[in-house]
Each structure stands twice: as C-alpha cells, then as structure tokens.
Image (spheres, coloured by chain):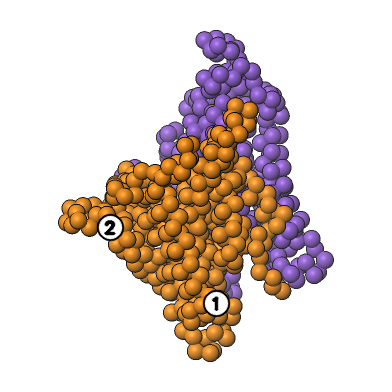
Chain colours: A purple, B orange
Amino acid sequence: MINSRFFNRSELLGFLALAVLLLLILPLSLDIFRLNLVAKYLTYAFVGIGLVLCWGYGGILSLGQGVFFGLGGYCMAMYLKLEASSVANTKIQSTPGIPDFMDWNQLTSLPFFWKPFHSFPVTLLAILLVPAFFALIIGAAMFKRRVGGVYFAIITQAIAAILTILIVGQQGYTGGINGITDLRTLHGWDIRTDHAKFILYFVEVVLLFGCIVAAQFIRLTKLGRILVAMREQEDRVRFSGYSVANFKIFAFCAAAVFAAIGGAMFTLEVGFMSPSFVGIVPSIEMVIYTAVGGRMSIFGAVWGALLVNFAKTSLSESFPQLWLFGLGALFIAVVLAFPNGLSGIWADHIQPRIDRLLSSRKSKSAAGMIADGAPAE
Amino acid sequence: MFGDYSISDLGAILAMQGFAGLILFSVYVLMALGLAIIFGQMGVINMAHGEFMILGAYVTWMTSNAVQHVAPWLFPGYFFIAMILAFITSGALGMLVEWALIRHLYKRPLDTLLATWGLSLILQQAYRSIFGAREVGVELPEWMMGSWQATDSIQIPINGMFVMALTILITTVVFYILFWSSWGKQVRAVVQNRVMAGAVGINTEKVDRYTFGLGCGIAGIAGSAFTMIGSTGPTAGQLYIVDTFLVVVFGGAASLFGTIASAFSISQTQSTLEFFLSGSMAKVITLLTIVGILMVRPQGLFALKVRK
C-alpha cells in the first residue's frame, strides 16, 4: 500500500504522472517499434535508480555500472542462447548442442560456467546474485580500506575496461566483440514477435515501478538517512558508531542489482547482448542520464534516461555529426549550471509556482529544497 | 611456456620485449606526467587528457604535411618544430579550458571528471569532423627509420630510442620546473595551502591556469611522440586514458617519482606478458594486478607521509 507518508504529495504526483505516461499514453500512441525503443531506454532507468541511491544519496560515484548491467544482461543472454542452441537447432555444427560461436572457435563441450544457465530459475537467481556478489567483493575490498571518491571512480572504470577486454578476448566463451546474438525464445516463448515485445514492455514497466518503490523505501528508512549523512560528513557518522563501509557496500550492491535487472531486460527487449554495453563509454553515459535527470531524484533518473535517449535517437537519426557535440555540451551544462539536473530545475522553479497557484495559504518556499520532482519537460 | 626457447633466445626475447616495454613506458610517462601534475597537484580529474594528447598528434601530422609541401629541406628536423607547436597548441587549449570550465569546479573533484568527459566527447567529434574518422600516420624522416643491430638477435628501433631520449629530457625539465624554479615553488605552495599562498602574494588563479596549461602541453608533446610509433585516430586518446589514470593512481597521486616507477613496472609487466600470452590477456592480467594491489594499498606505491 502506498500511503501518504511513503510518498509525499509531489512524489505521488510524479509517480502517477510516470505511470500514466508509461502505462497509458506511450503504449496507445506509439507503434511497436517505437515502444520497443522506449523499453530499451527504460532499461537504463534501472541503472539510473541505482545510481541515485549510490551516487546521489551515498556519494559513491561508480563509473562501472556497465559491468553490472552487462553481467545481468549476459546471464539472461546465456540462458536464451542455450535455449536457442538445442541439439535440434544446431544439427549442422560439428558439436551440436553448444552455442554457434563456441563451435566456430573449436570448442567441443560447454564450458562449466555455462552449464547452470540451462535452468530458468537458476538464471533468474544468477541475474540478481552474480552482480551483487561482484559488487560485494569490489565494495568490501575498497570501502573497508576507505577508498572513496575519485579513486573509487577510477578503479570501477578500470574494472569496466578489464571486463570488456576479457569478453572481447575470450571469444570462444563469450561470443567476443559481437556478443551473444540470435536469441529466440524465453522458456519456450518466442520473444521476437510484436506481441511478445508488447508484453515485455509492460513487464518491464511493472519491474521498474517495483524498483522505484524499493528505492523509495530504502531512501525513507533510517538507512537512507545514514547514506545522506555519510555523504555529507563521513567521519561524524563513523564516530557515531556506524560502520560506514557496510552502508556503502549495501548501497553499491543495491545499485548493482538494479543495474543487473535493467541489463537482463535489455537482453530480452533488444534480443542480444554485447561488450559495447559493458565498457567505459556506456558506463559513463549511464551516469550522464542520471546527472541530467537529477542525481538526487529517483523519478528524475527515469526521466533523464528517457529524455536523453530520446534526444540521442532523434539527433543521431537526423544529425549524426551533432549528437556527440550535443551530449558533451549537455553534460558540461548540467554539471556547471544544474548539479541537480532536471528534477532540481523542477523543484526550484516550477514546483513553487504550481504550489502558489494551487494554494495561496501554503507559502512554504521550496527553493533550495531537494524534492523528488515530477516530470520536467 | 618457456619450453620451446633456448637460453640465448630467451635472453634476446627478454631484451627486445623489455625494449618494447621501454617504449610503452616512455609514452606512459609522457602522458602520465601531465596527468600527475593536473591530478596529483591540482586534484582535477581530466578525462579529456587523452584528447589533448591527440591534439598534439594531429598538430604533428599537420606540421609534417606542411613541411613536406612548403620546405622539404626542413623535413629531417620537422619533428622538433612539431613538438614545440604541439606543446603550445595543447597548452593554450588547456588554459582556455581551465578558464572556461575547470576553475568553477575546484571544490567538486568528482564533477570535474564528468565535465571533462563531456569535453572529451566534444573534442573527439571535433577531430572527426575536421580530420576525418580515419587514422592518420606521419612520415618519419630517414634518420629515424631502421634499427640498431645490437647483437645478432637483438634489434632496437631508432625511433623508439628517440622517444626514450625525449622522455628523459621532458621529465628532467618538468622536475626542474616543479622542484627548483620559483614558479614550481608557487605551484606547490598553492597545492599545499591555497589561502595562505594567496595571502603571501601568489596569484593563485594564474598559477592554476598555468599549471593546467603545462599539464596539457606535456600531453601534447606525448601525442607528438606517439605519432612516431603509431597512427592517430579521433578516439585513440580514450584508449589510453584509463591506463594513464591507473599509472598515476598506482604510483601515488601526489608523487611524480611514483608515477615514473609505476609507469615502468606496468609497461614492463604488460610487454613481457604480451609475448607469452595474447595481447588482451596480458592487458587483463596487468590491469587486474594493478586493481588488486590498489585494493590492498590504496594510497599507491609512493605515498607522501601526511597526517590527515
């Protein structure tokens, strides 16, 4: 149940606006190709929600979210690939029953780490647990030694680079630079049809709202307040007897799990997974979406992912030259002028006016307050 | 993995891979020096550093073309002109960037990372629009080609030796500037205590701008040197930026000596491993080792002993 304490009025409005847009307006007005594109954008919103918790609230900038996005996506892709390469489908290979790229790379049996992905429940568990485990190791190693800030950002970036090089280099085990392609069915259900894409879109939106509620829950509990306190005055939190490292590890793991869900949905929506969604550049782009939407706002992250990707698609369709200029300039502008992104603009400039219009008695100034803004279009 | 080689073969392999590592080391040092000044001394994370390097490479390429057309007699020595031009161009752009962008962000180091990433996207696209997406390579003058036959099985390319000599020269100059000149004293004073440095009459804003410019200018020289051993494309800078940051962090951010030591160990590890494993696995193992060591020793190899 969503009561008024869980979401305050403006957050509830934001939630409803997003729900109406995603569940009614977009599915009714867009054709299936565009709707599938929106679904692709929304997969980044999952990463964005994680980054809001980890970066906006916890102050931990991770430039390696692509790693977790990729791990989630690859787990899903491995399951789908194994299903697509049944013995019947791969009769012409020299070793039937293994994925085609393994056959091209002279592998004769399935590598051990592929075997668990025959099972659907194990795959679902792996999508959540593998990235969380990675994040736990990275987080435990770094935060326990009080590595933070800039160093953490650079090291996560290096990890993204390592994973990309590894995936590209180990072609026989991972599909190399092309990634895992030619995915057909999910548990016997063809994911390539328009109908399936329509259903997957709604599954994704429901999952997204689940993640929003989960993030909101984390934000409102004592845990969320400790995260903010930690960002502002880490030492004071430590002296108060809290284990700063454990809270950071938790935020980082939560962000990793959100990103992994996004990655798994990405594989389902787009139909393949490749290292080009794992490396440094996509990881930083994910941070860009969050920064544009507002690093302090869960809804802002969703809007940022939608709007920046929408701009990317329309700009790169019509002016491929201009797109990178636009993205770069947008990023500089957001960092220099609007550190709280679109939701900051909404909360500082638009929300107060609406409030004034709605009720003259409420004169509480919202300026400077970081509210979780609803859409800023 | 050693089974197929005789002892003397192994010696030659080690020597030649060691030398290949030394060339990589030179490029790392040149790139990391600029970054160590900007990151270690000023605390600014310049993700566009690779793009400043590529700017130097393009300047060298343009100089080489111009010299070939206008003054062919100058060609054997064009490289020295190109390097000076590369230093000036990258340095000037760096100072402009510092003025327009960086100076507003000194209190938010993580945001310099994001803003300069935006800058690097813009610069990459600018290179692509101006110079085309294809990689360009410069023609070397004759005296730089060929190699020096040290023994029967050991060959050392001359351009590699030139890059190394250049690295030693630049490093010496940078050390002189930072540790002996009065300007270097001002830089270090500003780094240690900005307010006090301002109070004793140092123009901190000017020092910041020139320090950033110097770092970027050295990146330009690095790019210039880079053209001698490889070709240059719009996105080549991005390939090196993470490596370079790791070099600086691994060495201990505030220590220039640490930067050189870590550049040496990383490049030697990588080039030696490259011979026995595939290039990608060598890179993975090297990077993993660095990340692993950084997890155990986050302050880097040579940390300054300070109370926090």
Q: Residues within 10 Å of mark 1 (few under 14, many from 20)?
A: some
Residue B35 in the figure: left or right of residue A316: right
Mark 2 element type = helix
Sooner in the amino-acid sequence: mark 1 or mark 2: 2
In depth, the one of A365 and B205 nearer the eye is B205
Residue B102 position, x and y percent, is: 46, 69
Residue B173 position, x and y percent, is: 45, 69
In depth, the one of A250 and B267 nearer the eye is B267
Q: Identify the image quadrant of the C terminus of chain A.
A: bottom left
- What residue sits right under mark 2 in the picture? B78
Q: Nearer the viewer, mark 1 or mark 2?
A: 2
**Residue type at the position of mark 1:** Arg
- Which residue is at 22% across, 58% downward? B74
Q: Quadrant of residue A77?
A: top right
**Residue type at the position of mark 2:** Tyr
Residue B297 position, x and y percent, is: 70, 57
Residue A166 in the figure: left or right of residue B294: left
- Which residue is at 47% across, 61% downward? B168
Disc sitting over residue A257 in the figure: none
Would residue A38 be seen by someone viewing this image from the given angle?
no
Would residue A175 be seen by someone viewing this image from the given angle?
yes
Chain to which mark 2 belongs: B
- Which residue is at 36% across, 43% downward? B146
- What residue sits right under mark 1 in the picture? B188
